[in-house]
Image: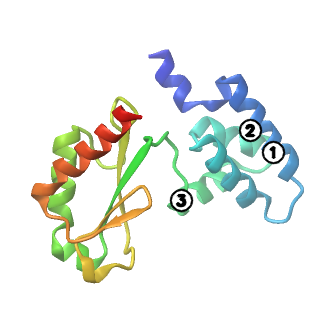
């Protein structure tokens, strides 16, 4: 249980704390410091947990509500660690009508996780996203940065297995 807690609080990891403090120190006085710092933290740490939001607010001497407001508004930010691979399900109109919900249901069933969660092995996170601009290919999923179109529900377990097998090979 302690390990799971540490994953939610990067401040408890000495190497990550050094990165966090470095980001804060070098960006606190820049115009738009909040976005600069949060973007850098998301890129380098991988997520911005509640304890980290509080720490950033304290260091910047701003209310935590300001930091939380930015983190919760922009979909780029996440408050929990993501898996090594992310599978996003487009919920734009064409994809939704084309059957994205069935794809998502198949993925949740196959991976035994809910939307927004990561598999216990830290390998795959499933998320929903808004239109990815590939409406003619509906329904669409995005595996990491790769768009896959016209995905059928019966292909979902095969796609997920391919991700898992790729990782086992490396």
Separation of residues labelled 3 and 1 (CA atoms): 19 Å
Give me the C-alpha separation between circle 2 and circle 3.
18 Å
Q: Secondary structure at mark 1?
A: helix
- Viewer-side residue, 62 vs 115: 115
* Residues packed near mark 1 inside 10 Å, few (<14), some (14 to 19) or many (20 plus): many
Position of the C terminus, as image quadrant, is top left
Q: Residue furthest bottom?
A: 136
Residue that extends furthest to the front in the rendered view of this protein: 169
Precedes in sequence: disc 2 or disc 3: 2
Residue visible at 33% across and 36% down? 119
Label 2's element? helix
How far across and how far down the image is residue 40, in percent? Answer: 70, 51
Q: Nearer the viewer, residue 124 or 91?
A: 124
- Residue denoted by label 3: 76
**Residue 110 higher or lower than 133, as above or below:** above
Q: Are marks 2 and 3 in contact (CB under 8 Å)?
A: no
Q: Any mark on residue 24, and which?
A: 1
User: Label 3 neighbourhood size at 10 Å, few (<14), some (14-19), many (20+)?
Assistant: few
């Amino acid at each position: 249980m302690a390990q799971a807690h540490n994953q939610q609080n990067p401040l408890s990891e000495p190497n990550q704390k050094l990165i966090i403090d470095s980001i804060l120190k070098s960006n606190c006085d820049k115009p738009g410091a909040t976005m600069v710092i949060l973007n850098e933290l998301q890129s380098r740490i991988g997520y911005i947990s509640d304890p980290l939001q509080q720490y950033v607010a304290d260091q910047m001497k701003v209310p935590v509500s300001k930091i939380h407001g930015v983190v919760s508004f922009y979909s780029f930010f996440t408050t929990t660690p993501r898996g090594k691979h992310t599978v996003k399900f487009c919920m734009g109109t064409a994809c939704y009508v084309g059957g994205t919900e069935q794809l998502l249901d198949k993925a949740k069933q196959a991976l035994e996780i809910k939307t927004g969660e990561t598999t216990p092995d830290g390998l795959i996170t499933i998320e929903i996203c808004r239109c990815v601009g590939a409406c003619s290919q509906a329904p669409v999923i995005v595996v990491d940065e790769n768009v896959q179109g016209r995905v059928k529900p019966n292909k979902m377990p095969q796609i997920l297995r391919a991700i898992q097998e790729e990782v086992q090979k490396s």
